[in-house]
Image: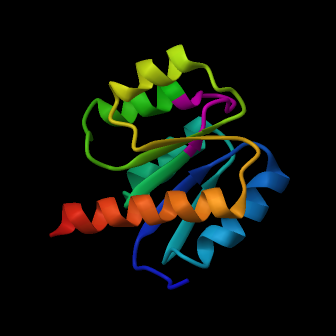
Amino acid sequence: MQKTHYTLLYIEDELATRSNIAKFLATRCAEVFEASDGEEGYKLYKKHLPDFIITDLQTPKLDGISLIQKIRSYDYTTPIIIISAYSDKEKLSYLQSYNILSYIIKPITRTGLKDMLDLVFSKLDEIRK
C-alpha cells in the first residue's frame, strides 16, 4: 500500500477504535486529523479543510448527521464516508441527499477500510483532474 498526499478528518468517539483505525489510516494518508466528537470535528474541518472526512454517526456534542448538514451547507464536494453500528436503510437513504460517498457498518475490517480508501482516493483523483 502506498501513502498518498491526501489529508483526512476522522471523527470517532470511542478512543480504542479511533486510535486503532487512525494508525492504519496514517499509513495511507499524508495527515490524519482526529476528533472525539462532532464539535471538535467541525473545528478541525474549518481549520484544516481536509481532502475527505470519515465520521461516525453517533458522536457526542454534535452528531454525525448534524455535522454533515453543517459542512454541506457550503461544501458539497468534500467526500464523506459514514461509519455506523446501525444499518438503518431509511437513514442511509436520507443521507444520500448529502452526497455521501460511502457507508460502512461496524465492526470495520482492514479489508473494508482498504476498499473504502481505494474508493475515496479514486474519487479524489477524479476530482483533481
Magenta part of the protein: which range?
A: 55-64
- Relative vertical location of residue 2 with respect to residue 51 in this rendering, above or below: below
For the question of whether residue 66 can be seen, the reply is yes
Residue 26 x/y as whole percent: 61, 74
Residue 94 percent across, percent down from the top left = 42, 18
| Magenta span includes 113 | no
Res 48 visible? no
Q: Main secondary structure of the magenta part?
A: loop
User: Residue 87's image quarter?
Assistant: top right
Placement of 98 over or under 113, stated as above or below? above
Q: Give the mark count.
A: 0
Question: On the rendered image, what quadrant is the N terminus found in?
Answer: bottom right
The residue positioned 69% from the left and 30% from the top of the image is: 60
Residue at image point 47% right, 43% down: 102
Tell me the quarter of the image containing the C terminus: bottom left
Seen at 32% across and 33% down, the residue is 72
Residue at 78% across, 63% down = 20
Is residue 59 part of the magenta span, yes or no? yes
Q: Residue furthest left?
A: 129
**68, 109: nearer the viewer:** 109
